[in-house]
Amino acid sequence: MKTTEELILSGSVITQTGFLENFNELVEKKETYHYDETYQPSSVYYGNRFQSPLPCWETDYLVNCDSDMNESIKSQVQSLFTKEIVDWHCRIRLTITDELKKSVHLKHGGSNSIGSVHHDAYDYAGVLPFEQSYAGGTAFYENNWDKAPDITYGSWPNRLVLYKGKRNHAACHDFTYEKRYMLIIFFNLKGQN
C-alpha cells in the first residue's frame, strides 16, 4: 500500500473530513487574528492588489501569532505522513467578495469563480475551509493552459484537502458569501527531494 507521500507525489489529492480536532477553537480564534492586505499569487508583482487574480487578507504565519495553534495543526498533519514535516508554513486567508469583484482578472476575461492557475514552491500544500460551498474550493488542472479543471473540490468546513504543491491548481470563490476564510498550509518532508 502506498504512503500518503507517495499518493500525493503521484498526483492524488487526499481529503479528510472532520480533520482538525480543535476546529471549533480555530473558528472562534480566526476573528481575533490580525490580517494584512495582500494578493495571490504573491510570487508575481502587481501594481496594486486589484490587478492580481486574488486580492485577499492573510494572517502572519501562525507560528508567529498563535504558536500553540500552529503546533497543534502541524502535529495533526504530521500524523498523516511517515517522514518528518519541514519548512512548515500555516496561515489563514480571508477573501472579501466585494474586493474580489474589483479584480482586473475577473473584469477582463477571468472566470466568474476560478482564480489564476498556478503552482506553489513547496512539495505539499493544503487547504482547510471554514464554510460549506460547492462553488468555492480548489480546482486542479493537468496543465496550466487548460481552460477547464480536471477536478474541483468544493469547500466543506474542517475538510482537509492535501495535494502536491507543484500541481497546477486555482482557488474557487463562491460569490454568495460576503467573505470566506481558508486555512492554508505549505510544507516539505525531511529527506525528500
Image: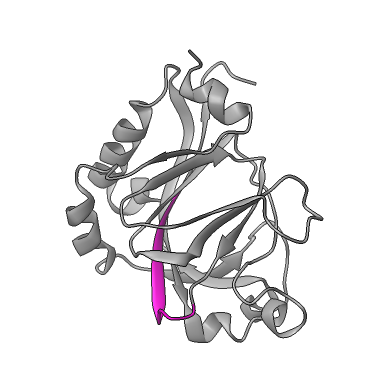
**Residue 131 image point, x, y percent:** 34, 65
Nearer to me, 25 or 70: 25
Quarter assignment of residue 161? top left
**Residue 55 image point, x, y percent:** 57, 74
Q: Residue at x 59, y 72 (%)?
A: 113
In the rendered image, the residue lying farthest to the right is 145
**Residue 81 image point, x, y percent:** 42, 23
Q: Residue at x 55, y 69 (%)?
A: 38
User: Does any portion of residue 60 appear in the rendered image?
Assistant: no
Q: Is residue 180 magenta?
A: yes
Q: Quadrant of the C terminus?
A: top right
Segment colored magenta: 175-184
Q: Is residue 39 left or right of residue 32?
A: right
Q: Residue at x 52, y 23 (%)?
A: 5
Q: Residue at x 53, y 83 (%)?
A: 99
**Residue 6 image point, x, y percent:** 56, 21
